[in-house]
Amino acid sequence: MDKRALFFEDGNFAFPLFVKSIASVPEDYRDCYNSDPAGDYKLKDLYWNELRLPFEREYEKLEREMSDLKAKHEKDVVAEKQARKQDKIDSTLHSACKGAGIPDGLMEGAIAILTAKATFEVDESYEFGGGVVIANSGGHLNSVEGLVENFLDSDEGAGFRGKRRAAPSDGYFTALLSGMKERR
């Protein structure tokens, strides 16, 4: 809002404190102004206090509230983004531990140890799935799955190992063996 504007956007007279020419003021409101020694016309104090000052105070209050709302919104956006990142990290850790065979009863303990040993970042450059979680342990970047496997292979992770599984295979060697066992 321009405090020197003669009219509001809705067309009503704005009662500015000073006007350059009395001719620019509508005839009904010319009595509200006194001539000023500087050559301008000044709104009489009575009208200023009754008409314009409450409006300006309300306007300043609304501007303060608007700036407070903008700051709160920015703060909320940052908090929401951080919460989404933390959710992504937690779900990735949980699924990596589950995939590695850590029993459900021990999963929270394994996650707590892994969280203490490494820091996690979400790389937002991958759009699919909302980003990729990268673990940084001792200056070495690793996937979360790799971090969990390294943890389970260490002495510290021995207690968290689930049942041993057979090494994964694509069935090629199994097919060879079964072919060798067939009668000729």
Image (cartoon, rainbow, N blue to C red):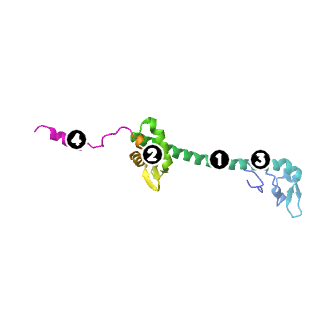
Residue 114 visible in the picture: yes
For mark 3, give the secondary structure.
Answer: helix
Q: Quadrant of residue 36 in the image?
A: bottom right
**Amino acid type of the residue that numbered disc 2 sits on in the rendered structure:** Gly
Label of residue 72 in the image = 1
For mark 4, give the secondary structure.
Answer: helix
For mark 1, give the secondary structure.
Answer: helix
Any magenta on residue 164?
A: yes
Viewer-side label of 4, 3 = 4
Name the residue that disc number 3 marks.
Answer: 58
The CA distance from mark 1 to mark 4 is 62 Å
Considering depth in this image, is 78 or 19 the residue closer to the camera? 78
Magenta segment boundaries in residue numbering:
162-184
For mark 2, give the secondary structure.
Answer: helix
Q: What residue lies at 42% left-to-right and 41% top-to-bottom?
A: 97
Viewer-side label of 3, 1 = 1
Considering depth in this image, is 157 or 174 the residue closer to the camera? 157
Vertical relation: 159 (above or below) 64: above
